[in-house]
Amino acid sequence: MRIRLVVPLAVAAVLLSGCGGPGQETAPSVPPLVSVPTMPSQTPSETPSSTPPASKVADTVCVRMDQGLVQATLGVPSVQIRLKAPPADFGVPVTYDGCELGLGGSVLRVGTSVQSATKATLAAVQKAYKGEPAKPAVVGAPGVTAPGFGASSFVVFLLDGQLYKVSGPKATLAKYIALAEEVARQVDGLPAPEPLITRPECDRGSAAAVKVMGGPPMFRRDGQTANGDLVCGWIAADGVLSTSARRTPKAAELMTAIRKTPTAQALPLGDEGYVDTATGRTTIRIGDGQLIDFVPLPARAINPDTMTQLALAMLSQYR
């Protein structure tokens, strides 16, 4: 007997502290973009402003960055603050909080590691990186010489016990080093990452998450996507577990590829569901346009029953 759990839920937006998120198969709806608020004029305006006052804008590195420098460096038509914080960028050995600057068609993202970091952490991140060949990068700013690495669309560097990741549209390594140096100039005095950013909807999965991870998390990172879908994240010293949704018209097609994986085990959940017994990744299709992912990192063999319990606990939170 197959169980279909679909319960509508109105998800409230939550601003994540700091500056990281699951990808979408289709381009997500873009959050409203507004320019960085300027100080109010001494003369009251007769026309109400739609821009929130500066006191209501979260203090992030993106708010502090020189927009003119960003625009000139990347050669983009505009630069605007995205007030809505993106979901955390989950990974091992580091998960990043993030903030974003809209670039008139693309996005510049600045991530700050949730966990504290050392040179060994930086080396582990570089070792785990897969993509365009990366090169060493030295990020310099007044009183700062920070080691890192990067390529034509990102730079990762270590500064004062945190890793920072600056990523966006393809340019050059030199340009991303220049942007990283602007980040290094602006991070002093920013609030430290909060250990727990939670939503009650995610709490219902916490007991099952502990069983999957083998112990309680050190950090929590719950939030939502640009489409308003729930994101839950449990972070331990040696692993991460997250849940998220993908909205795509190719949901059934993508499930076909998952179904054909030799290590896929069917689950009686949603319209179609599978757990990969080799990696632990669990994917459930709801209708023709939505996939729900339950992802343990690092990928490893996990008892399918524990992943099923997590899916049962959380699936009703996705419509």
Image (cartoon, helix red, strand yellow):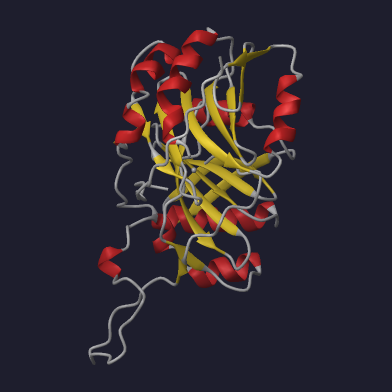
Residue 290 pos. (x, y %): 59, 39
* Residue lying at the far front of the rendered structure: 1
Number of numbered discs visible in the structure rendering: 0
Residue 31 pos. (x, y %): 49, 60
Residue 77, located in which quarter of the rendered image?
bottom right
Q: Quadrant of the N terminus?
A: top right
Give the side of residue 34 with respect to residue 279, left or right. left
Residue 197 seen anywhere in this rendered image of the structure: no
Q: Is residue 72 above or below residue 11?
A: below
Q: Is residue 212 above or below residue 95?
A: above
Residue 316, located in which quarter of the rendered image?
top left
Give the residue at x 61% y 44%: 24
Residue 35 seen anywhere in this rendered image of the structure: yes
| Front-most of residues 203 and 8 | 8
Residue 280 pos. (x, y %): 57, 16
Give the residue at x 62% y 11%: 277
| Front-most of residues 189 and 41 | 41
